[in-house]
Structures are given as C-alpha cells and as structure tokens.
Image (cartoon, helix red, strand yellow):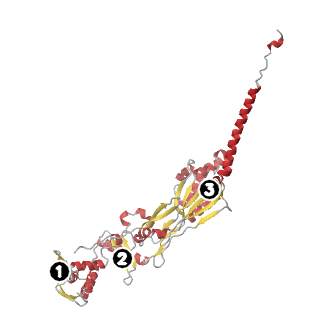
Amino acid sequence: MGVGAFLTKKRRWPLHSSSKRIQAALVACTLVLTVLMGRAVQLQAIDAPATAAEAAKKMRRSVPLPAVRGAISDRNGNLMAATEAAVDVVADPYAITTLGLPPERLSEGQKEKGRRAPAAIAQIVVAHLGGDEEALTRQLSDSKKRFVVLRRQVPKFVYSEMQDDLRNGDLFGVYSINHPKRIYPAGSVAANVVGFVTPDESKDGLQTSKGAAGLEYALDKHLAGEPGRQTYETSPQGRIPLGDSVLTPAKDGASVKLTLDSDLNWQTEKILQAATKREGASSGMALVMNVKNGEVLALANYPSFDPNSFDKVPQKHLGNRVITDAYEPGSVQKVVTMAALADSGLVNPDTKVSVPPSLMSGGKPIRDAFSHGTIRLTARGIIANSSNIGTAKLARKLDKKKMTEYLSSFGLGRPTGFGLPGEASGSIPKP
C-alpha cells in the first residue's frame, strides 16, 4: 500500500445543502430589515407626533408661583398681619459629599474636599441660622440622603447672606424652597380677632398657609389669592435661556382694613387684664363701639395669646369669647326693655313709678346696687340710676309674649352676622 493510502479524503458537501443555508440567511436578514423598516416607519410617520410630544414634555418644567397673602391692618393703617418673604433651607448630602459628580469620577483631591465639605457647610449654616454644628455635620455627611430640611421659613435676606458665604467657600448642595412666613407685628393686640394661620401644602408641593382662626380663617379666600404657574424649556444643564416660556402670574390676596384701633385695643386689654385679676375671675371680655355708627373700635379678651407663637398657648385661650360665649346682657337689658315700653306707648321719659327696697320675682328678691327705701323715680331716673327694681316694675306693664317679640326684633336670640367664626346666637326664654 502506498503512502497516499493513509491520507484522509477531503469531504465535500452537496451543492444543494449550501444553497439552503444561504437562502435561510437571506430570509433571516430580510425579516430583520423588514422589522427595522417597520419600526422606522412607525417612529417617523405613525408615532411621530406622540414621540415628539413626549420628548417636548420631558424638556419642559412647570413651576407653581406662590401668591402673597393679603395684609390685615387697623383703621390707621398699622399692620396686624403681614407676609414676610421667607424660604425653607434644604440640603442634598449626596451632592455635598460627591461635589455633584459621579463618585467613580472623583480624584483623590476631590474625595478629600467632599469629606471636608459637610463640616465647612455646617459651620456657615450655624453662624447664620444657629443650631448644633456637630449634629448638623453628621446630618450633612449622610451621603445616602438626597433631601434634608435644615430650617423652615428663614427670612430671605438671611438666606441670601448665608449663600454668599457658601459661594465664597466654593461650597454647594444647600438650596431653598419658597415658603412665605406670616407675621403679626402687633403681637397679642387683638389676637383673638385677627387669628392665625397654619402651614398648608398644595398638590404641586407649594408651601403655603391657610387661615385657622379669627379673621384669618373667616376671610381666608379673600386673603389667600390664587397661585400662578410658569412653564419653560429645560436641558440637562438647566433652563434654556431663549426657550419657550409660558407665564400665568399669581394673583396676590386682597388686604383688609379693620375698624379696630390697635392703640385703643392695647389700652382696653391692659384695663381688662387688671380688672380680671382684681376680681379673681378666670377670664374677661371687653368691647368698645362707636355708638353713632356701630363700628367696633376695640375687642379684647383675657387671657389672650401671641399669634406668632400660638402653638405654645393652651387651646382654650385661642378663641374669641366675645363672639363664642353666650352671657346675660345685664344692665344693657334695661335700655331694650325701656325702648319696648316706649314703643308700645306704655311709658314716656317722665312716667313715674314707686320703687320699693326690693321686689319679689320668680320666688327671689330683686334689689338695686344702691340701698334705698321706697322712692319715686321717673323712667328717665330709672335708667340714670340703673334701677333693677324700677325696670322690673315697668316691664310688668307689657305682657310676656309681647316683650319676647320685642326682644327678638332687637336681634336677641340669633347671630349678629359680625363676620367672625363661631358666633353664639344666645337664647330668649319662652314666655
């Protein structure tokens, strides 16, 4: 056997088998190209409007614009409630420790700067806002967090001064969110009338406030205003300077001017406080009106509160007892009774009546504040001396049903419509 007998013969595939493989490959390529072309047609023609709209949506940012709450002032223009420009100071610990860069791209020098940044920022923040520097450093060093509130409702000028120091130190990661602060320059003066607001948050995350007591609550819709909105184009680098922008301005709230005189109200409160303590009473109320036109010039409550720190006061002191409490009218009732008698033609200013030392009514004696025997007084004299006995004797001239009708016609037994929340209606005994 020759050497060539040990050589393996080269295998040949049938020609028809190779053709089938080529055909299969062509079919597969055709299918892939068909799918790609179909997808291209879908994106360019069929879905083009929707795709463009989605892209445009991602490039737009819509920001709510807060409305400034209206002010409340007294009759002389002295502010009793106002809104101060303020912000919530917040931080991004992750951005602080990474300098806003991907961690894997940081050089050793940048990493060291990121480690020192929390302490440097904490020192500046505490210098402007106060607080515990060590605790704040720990808080800002927690790189797992992206949002930390450092202080709420900081005056804008304070925040601006702090940001200047941060920029000078090449430090960032601390920013602000608008959160206007409601302030009460008059403090506790007429606080039970003015009321106070509590924090509120809109569905857009806008930090606002809402009336919770007094006129702040009763006139909330007028004082609050309507927030606006600004929509503009953005890129990964921020707002596009010449991009499209749509602005709907906020409508600031309406301001309110009261008939109250804050100086008179302060004096009334001091007198009321002294009288309440002198009499050993738990609370007191005082109302000063202009009898010619019905204007309320002063409305005082004791104890009262400072609406700038209402959360530190017992709940029972936050209301307005002049409005919410029903009480016996006292000697004011004499004027109402005498008016009813005069209107009925039963009494005139010179009508005389014998006034004994006491008078039984309902099984109990009625007496006057001053001691006397049996005396004769005119209707005018009864009012001048505030005689309980004389008023009661004259009132018996009018039947009970008719007297009840007169009391009702004077407005007793129903709310006055004063405008403050929680007004008691009082009651008139049935005849």
Q: Is residue 217 left or right of residue 105?
A: left
Q: Residues within 10 Å of mark 3 (few under 14, many from 20)?
A: few
Q: Would you place residue 325 above or below residue 378 in this image?
A: above
Q: Which of the pair 251/392 is nearer the observer?
A: 251
Q: Which quarter of the rendered picture does the C terminus lie within? A: bottom left
Furthest residue to the bottom? 350
What residue is rendered at 53% in x and 55% in y?
A: 149
The label shown at residue 320 is none
Residue furthest top as drawn = 1
Q: Helix or strand or loop: what does disc 3 sit on?
A: helix
Residue kind at label 3, given as amino acid type: Lys
Which of marks 2 and 3 precedes in the sequence? 3
Q: Which mark is first along the chain, 3 or 1?
A: 3
How far apart marks 3 and 2 lie (CA) works out to 59 Å
User: In the picture provided, is 351 more to the left or to the right than 213?
Assistant: left
Question: What is the CA distance from the residue labelled 1 to the residue labelled 3?
Answer: 87 Å
Residue that mark 2 sits on: 287
Q: Which mark is residue 358?
A: 1
Residue at the (56%, 58%) spot, across then down = 125
Looking at the image, which residue is at 51% across and 58% down?
203
Query: Left or right of 7: which side holds 351?
Result: left
Q: What is the distance, in whole Å, between disc 1 and disc 2 at their CAs?
A: 31 Å
Disc assigned to residue 57: 3
Residue type at numbered disc 1: Ser
Pointer 1 or 2: first along the chain: 2
- In this orientation, does residue 174 appear? yes
Q: Secondary structure at mark 2?
A: strand
Q: Secondary structure at mark 1?
A: strand
Of circles 3 and 2, which is in front? 3
Number of other residues with Cα within 10 Å of mark 1, as a class: few under 14, some 14 to 19, many 20 or more: some
Residue 163 relative to residue 422: left or right: right
Percent position of residue 86, x then y: 54, 64
